């Protein structure tokens, strides 16, 4: 496992939804830790974690949807595979970790699982909580040596219990779950690197959406960009379900510095965030662009859908 894991971390795009307050806390913590690395220990992780997501994620991050420039002229950029699919390389560790933006991640079974674009609340998590797999170790920070990534359940998220998820493949998705102040909290982590995507089913099929949709809502770019919870419901369930089925047939395309349409689509005319609610309580968040492009999570590929089906869905997002 050693050689494999050493090649499985790089600069990953971070969720836009993280609050400005969290950013301020992280910047302050990062500055303090840089001035006193010798005094940095597990309680520091706990202090920073409480400023972040409810599931206690510890991460340095940036608000940027563009493809990471670090991939330029190296071997970690996604490439078109034989047969027309897209190869998503394993995540790479930057040579200079002190300059890395880190996202919540867990090492499990020789793979890197990272924060996801699918959400659920603690109460719904109870119903799909699977077998306990282990407990994360607060062993990875921006100064970690590569050996830190070789250890099972090494993480950037502090100490959390890790479980499989009922109804989902644990090679794809795992869950952290626990209680704080008597209230349950949970979060998904997914492995979407080190694989070949031949069609949308290789990603969207793993989300178990077909026949499992209970509703959906959307918001515009400006609301998403400013973290405003101004959501609008999707009225036509037939169009929504047709769209969900067609996701499995979408064509994957590699993201690159000069081939990433989201870079020029950050406006209310061309950009929508679509949240699809499933019967098991999970919420799948997708980014849709007017020209038929679809993004999920923080991976090195996006997807193109057939024009007629996509345009019907886009008509519901007005």
Image (cartoon, rainbow, N blue to C red):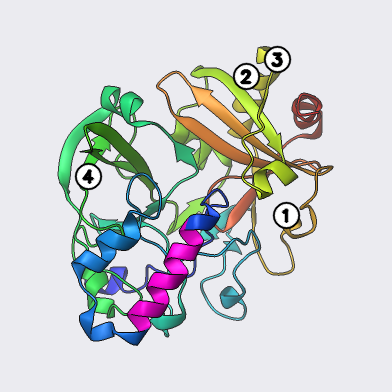
Question: Mark 2 or mark 4: which is in front?
Answer: 4
Query: Measuring 33% from the left and 45% from the top, which residue is drawn there?
Result: 55
Quarter holding the C terminus? top right
Q: Which residue is mark 2?
A: 241
Q: Which residue is mark 3?
A: 235
Q: Residues within 10 Å of mark 3 (few under 14, many from 20)?
A: few
Residue 14 visible from this viewpoint: yes
On screen, residue 287 above or below 2: above
Q: Which residue is mark 4?
A: 162
Question: Mark 3 or mark 1: which is in front?
Answer: 3
30 drawn magenta: yes
Span shown in magenta: 22-34
Q: Which sits earlier in the primary sequence, circle 2 or circle 4?
A: 4
Q: Nearer the viewer, residue 309 or 280?
A: 280
On screen, residue 35 above or below 316: below
* SS for dot 4: strand
Image position, residue 220 (x, y; %): 73, 39
Q: Which residue is mark 1?
A: 262
Distance in Å between CA atoms under marks 1 and 2: 25 Å
Distance in Å between CA atoms under marks 3 and 1: 26 Å
Query: Measuring 40% from the left and 74% from the top, which residue is drawn there?
Result: 30
Q: Which sits earlier in the primary sequence, circle 3 or circle 4?
A: 4
């Amino acid at each position: 496992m050693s050689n494999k894991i050493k090649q499985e971390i790089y600069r990953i795009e971070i969720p836009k939804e993280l609050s400005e307050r969290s950013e301020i806390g992280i910047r302050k913590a990062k500055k303090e830790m840089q001035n006193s690395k010798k005094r940095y220990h597990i309680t520091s992780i706990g202090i920073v974690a409480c400023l972040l997501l409810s599931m206690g994620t510890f991460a340095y991050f940036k608000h940027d949807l563009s493809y990471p420039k670090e991939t330029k002229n190296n071997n970690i950029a996604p490439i078109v595979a034989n047969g027309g699919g897209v190869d998503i390389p394993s995540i790479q560790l930057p040579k200079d970790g002190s300059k890395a933006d880190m996202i919540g991640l867990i090492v499990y079974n020789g793979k890197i699982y990272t924060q996801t674009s699918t959400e659920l609340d603690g109460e719904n998590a109870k119903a799909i909580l699977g077998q306990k797999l282990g407990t994360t170790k607060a062993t990875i920070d921006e100064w970690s040596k590569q050996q830190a990534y070789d250890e099972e359940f090494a993480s950037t998220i502090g100490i959390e219990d890790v479980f499989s998820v009922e109804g989902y493949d644990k090679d794809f998705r795992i869950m952290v779950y626990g209680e704080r102040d008597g209230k349950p909290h949970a979060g998904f982590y997914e492995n979407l690197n080190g694989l070949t995507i031949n069609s949308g089913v290789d990603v969207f099929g793993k989300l178990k959406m077909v026949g499992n949709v209970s509703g959906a809502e959307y918001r515009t770019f400006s609301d998403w960009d400013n973290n405003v919870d101004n959501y609008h419901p999707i009225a036509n369930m037939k169009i929504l379900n047709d769209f969900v089925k067609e996701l499995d047939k979408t064509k994957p395309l590699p993201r690159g510095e000069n081939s990433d349409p989201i870079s020029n689509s950050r406006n209310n005319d061309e950009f929508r965030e679509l949240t699809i609610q499933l019967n098991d309580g999970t919420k799948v968040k997708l980014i849709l662009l007017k020209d038929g492009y679809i993004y999920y999570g923080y991976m090195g590929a996006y997807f193109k859908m057939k024009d007629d089906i996509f345009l019907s869905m886009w008509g519901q997002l007005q």
